[in-house]
């Protein structure tokens, strides 16, 4: 009997967008999330992210705040204006309480400081939310 390999069905896989301009971080996250069965898209800045959001639906966004073109706060403001309810986990090096407060007011559900957490923990958080 022949073995049939089936491709991952993207319609059932959770769609995750990584919005991160630091290529090594985005590549590691993409590899780890792909391995967990997620349908992962990487946007290297906020402008690309909003263009992708305007074209399709995502289940979760991992969002850096400091990026070229359009920063993460601007992405959150755009999402609020567009009434986009996609869950956002901020993943940034900004650790000031005012930054956390601003991101949460703009709709971020979680706020992670990169230097305080191992990237495998981020993958765990995304997986638990699945």
Image (spheres, helix red, strand yellow):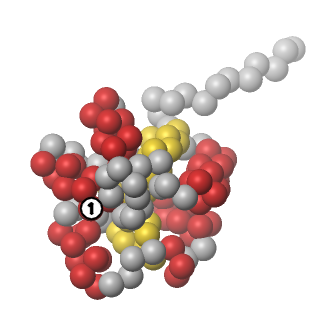
Left or right of residue 58: residue 13: right
Secondary element under disc 1, as helix, strand or loop, is helix
Q: Position of residue 48 (x, y in %)?
A: 38, 41
The residue drawn where x is 32% and y is 59% is 72
The residue drawn where x is 27% and y is 61% is 73
> How many numbered marks appear?
1
In this rendered view, identify the residue nearer to me: 87 or 17: 17
For label 1, the crowd category at 10 Å Cα-Cα, with few meaning under 14, some 14 to 19 and many 20 or more, is many
Q: Where is residue 21 in the image (x, y as percent from the top left)?
A: 49, 55
Looking at this view, name the residue that lies furthest to the right.
1
In this rendered view, identify the residue nearer to me: 121 or 41: 41
User: From the viewer's perspective, is residue 64 above or below residue 104?
Assistant: above
The residue drawn where x is 50% and y is 44% is 42
The residue drawn where x is 38% and y is 82% is 95
Left or right of residue 109: residue 4: right
Q: Can residue 71 be seen in this view?
A: yes
Q: Can residue 29 be seen in this view?
A: no
Q: Where is residue 106 in the image (x, y as percent from the top left)?
A: 19, 63
In this rendered view, identify the residue nearer to me: 66 or 76: 66
């Amino acid at each position: 009997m022949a073995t049939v390999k089936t491709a991952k069905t993207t319609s059932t896989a959770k769609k995750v967008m990584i919005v991160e301009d630091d290529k090594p971080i985005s590549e590691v996250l993409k590899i780890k999330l792909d391995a967990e069965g997620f349908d992962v898209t990487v946007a290297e800045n906020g402008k690309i992210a909003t263009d992708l959001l305007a074209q399709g639906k995502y289940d979760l966004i991992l969002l850096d705040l400091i990026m070229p073109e359009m920063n993460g706060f601007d992405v959150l403001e755009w999402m609020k204006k567009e009434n986009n309810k996609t869950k956002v986990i901020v993943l940034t090096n900004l650790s000031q309480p005012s930054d956390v407060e601003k991101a949460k007011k703009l709709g971020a559900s979680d706020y992670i400081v990169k230097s305080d957490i191992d990237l495998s923990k981020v993958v765990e958080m995304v997986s638990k939310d699945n």
